[in-house]
Amino acid sequence: MARRSTREKLSQEINAGSMADIAFLLLIFFLVTTTIAEDKGVLVKLPPWVEEEQPEQIIKERNVLTVLINAQNQLLVEGEEMDIDDLREAVKLFIKNPDNDPNKAEKPTKAIVSLQNDRGTKYEIYLQVYNELKAAYRELWEEEAMRLFGKPYDALNKDQQRKVRNNFPLVISEADPTEFGEE
Amino acid sequence: MAHFQKKRGKTTPAISTASLPDIIFMLLFFFMVTTVLRTATLKIQVITPTATELTKLVKKSLVNYIYIGYPLKPYQKELGTKPRIQLGDKIADVRDIPLFLEQHKAKVPEKLHPRITTSLRVHKDVTMGIVYDVKTALRKANQLKVNYSAKKKAENQ
């Protein structure tokens, strides 16, 4: 047997050649067992369930924006047909009411959006409308944040955000759907 | 002045593979971070709609999933073609929702209960009737934080 020189002994390392194989094995395992996360969505807070009928609150008609989506997926805002693309502007105009229109909200804090749909309404359309309503409020908050603090809404701290939101409270009331067009 | 180096032997040295494990590990970590373990095999098809006002669900352990969609081809014989609800691995009924929510609640620490969110993953063509029934069941079970799962829409402005 040939004697090894001291230098050879020093340079001996752990063989890392199989490391790649191990890592590959793990990689393939994760590739197979996982799906890419796409956990995003429109966050909604449902109203709590109450057994008995609530006494009807007296809300002035002018403060309520009625949004209806029927089973034919048509959008009806305050009794008039409307395109989904125009909804955002209409909602903003209704809440802000810059010209003091007697048919629009007295104050942004009093405005309520009432959303009603049929049982036959397509979920996609419903979500689109809901999304537009949220987007309208989001834009209002953005404007208010700029006006009050000179910063975009996301850059504000919690208290400031609350203050902005209190000036334009998001109130979407969902009525029970009508029975039309059930599959 | 210049001292030229001797030419090396003609044979090219083998490419060093020492950095290969590092590269693979990097890939591995990327996939580990960006993916979630598959929780349920879906028996129904769910294509979520698109939206712009999206909120990310951060804590996976605080989320339970309710799927609503059309049964996939292989299951259509037993399930029909009407939209169905799936809770976890099983096709279920609206009546099974409270129990499902309780089972999930039991796994979550008491003080985090108010932060539990239900992710509704609904096929875009489903009608609101079944969605409303599920919503009513959630309201009755006092599970009020709901997230309508949706994909990001590319806004054309």
Image (tube, coloured by chain):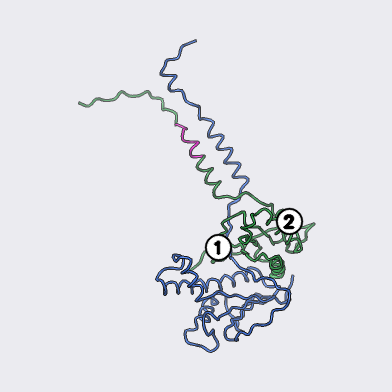
Chain colours: A blue, B green
Q: Could you tell me which residue is drawn at 46 percent across and 32 percent down?
A: B18
Residue B18 shown left or right of residue A52 in the figure: left
User: Magenta stretch?
Assistant: B16-24
- Residue lying furthest front: B111
- Of the pair B16 and A178, the residue shown nearer to us: A178
Q: In x, y percent, where is residue A106?
A: 53, 85
Above or below B99: residue B31: above
Q: Earlier in the sequence, mark 1 or mark 2?
A: 1
| SS label for mark 1 | strand
Mark 1 = which residue?
B55
Q: Could you tell me which residue is drawn at 44 percent across and 72 percent down?
A: A145
Identity, as a three-letter code, of the amino acid under mark 1? Thr
The numbered dot on residue A50 is none
- Of the pair A167 and B136, the residue shown nearer to us: A167
Q: Quadrant of the C terminus of chain A?
A: bottom right
For mark 2, does the 10 Å Cα neighbourhood hold few (<14), some (14 to 19), or many (20 or more) residues? few
- In the rendered structure, the residue with mark 1 lies on which chain? B
Above or below A57: residue A1: above
Q: Could you tell me which residue is drawn at 73 percent across and 56 percent down?
A: B73
Mark 2 = which residue?
B73
- Of the pair A52 and A73, the residue shown nearer to us: A52
